[in-house]
Amino acid sequence: MNYDIQLKNNINKNYIYTLLQNIDLTRGIWMIYLAGKGMSLTQLGLLEMIFHITSFLMEVPTGAVADIFGRRISRILGRVLSLVSVVILLAADGFLWFAISFVFTALSFNLESGAGDALIYDSLKEIGEEDRYMKISGRKEVFYQAAEVISFLAGGYMATKSYNIAFAITIIIGAAAVLQSFSFKEPTIGRKKEDQKGKNIFLNQLKESLRVVKSNPRIVSLIVFTEIILTFCTCIFFYLQNFMKGYGYNEAIIGVVYAASFVAAALTASWVHRIERVIKKQGILLIIPFVTVACLWGIALSPYHFIFFILLTITEEIVFIAMSDYINKMIPSENRATILSFSSMIFSFFMITVFPLVGLLGDRYSLSFAIKCLGGLGIVFVIINSVLLLNPGRKIRK
């Protein structure tokens, strides 16, 4: 088969892969599941912290693995480790084994986080169609959100019957994702020539990537902006399970709320490139933080917290797609996976700091109080972000 056709096929294959990779019936119930196994909110926060400590330490090295040995290989390894982590979580009964499962989950996330985007962007770049990335990324997000809807509806329903069934189905679909990961064609663009051996390959890759970042400070500013927003959204995404459970909702209803949020996000995903044309990059950087913080306070104070959660998911979708496009355009192909992994490393740093604190405050006071504190932190971010964007007036007008 023609090489260019194989690269084009990567795009359609990635849609199917995205669906299989993200159908996880445990996603909307795992915190409730572990709470039922005796884990407190503080312990749940510690488990997530273990995930992000692992991710923080391994993000850039795994990104370098993708840049040196191939994004396809990185994806395959990531899916295998993800499958192992779910099996451990189902079989385990105790904090230590839960922690081991979270380590494997983090490594799986690391191996995919930079490699997946890099594989698709460079497939497009090699055939001269990288300008389509934002549109294709939006379409991919529709498949991602469809997988999430399936996960939350089916997972929430299965949890009312048996958690074991939800885990078993997730394991079967995870095995299918492993098989699908073998089908991609590796783009030659951006691949490192293996003319060095051992640690020198990794060290040189890291040094080159750091030089790219230092030469363009805008990469860092966009990464930090994106990961702060995603940290707020991720904290709410996980703790809302227990928050709603405390209000008397069962797993099935919680699954419906999460599914509705992802339907809204899926509808938004295909429109992000049009939204960006209207409000531009500056509009996204200014407006989205205000909307995000308003949603945090709405969740904490309003009886209609689920509506504000849906709005929060929509803002997260806009940020994720738009910022991914902006950042990718500034990164050379040979450093793409490494720098994108650096982005995930920043996210992990924020999560290590914030996520356990939310759990601790939830245990000592209430999750409502913890979310209010998160909202207060968000107000500080909005003020700093607005000052930094609007203060250098000449640059903004230009």
Image (tube, helix red, strand yellow):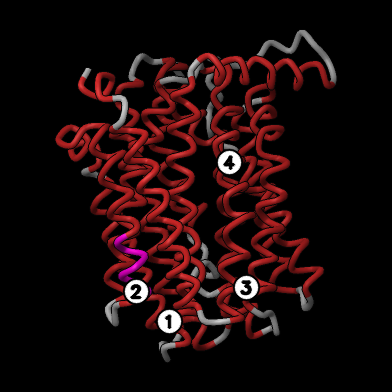
Q: Label 4 to label 3, Cα distance in Å?
A: 22 Å
Q: Which mark is residue 257?
A: 2
Q: Position of residue 221 (x, y in %)?
A: 45, 31
Residue 5 shown left or right of residue 89 in the figure: left
Judged from the image, the secondary structure of the residue bearing numbered disc 1 is: helix
Which residue, given by chain and number where applicable, does mark 4 sit on? 346
Q: Label 2 to label 1, Cα distance in Å?
A: 10 Å
Q: Which mark is residue 244?
A: 1
For marks 4 and 3, the one nearer the N-term is 4
Q: Which of labels 4 and 2 is toward the front? A: 4
Q: Residue furthest bottom?
A: 248
For marks 2 and 1, the one nearer the N-term is 1
Q: Which of labels 4 and 3 is toward the front? A: 3
Q: Quadrant of the C terminus?
A: top left
Residue 140 shown left or right of residue 185 in the figure: left
Is 30 covered by the magenta stretch? no
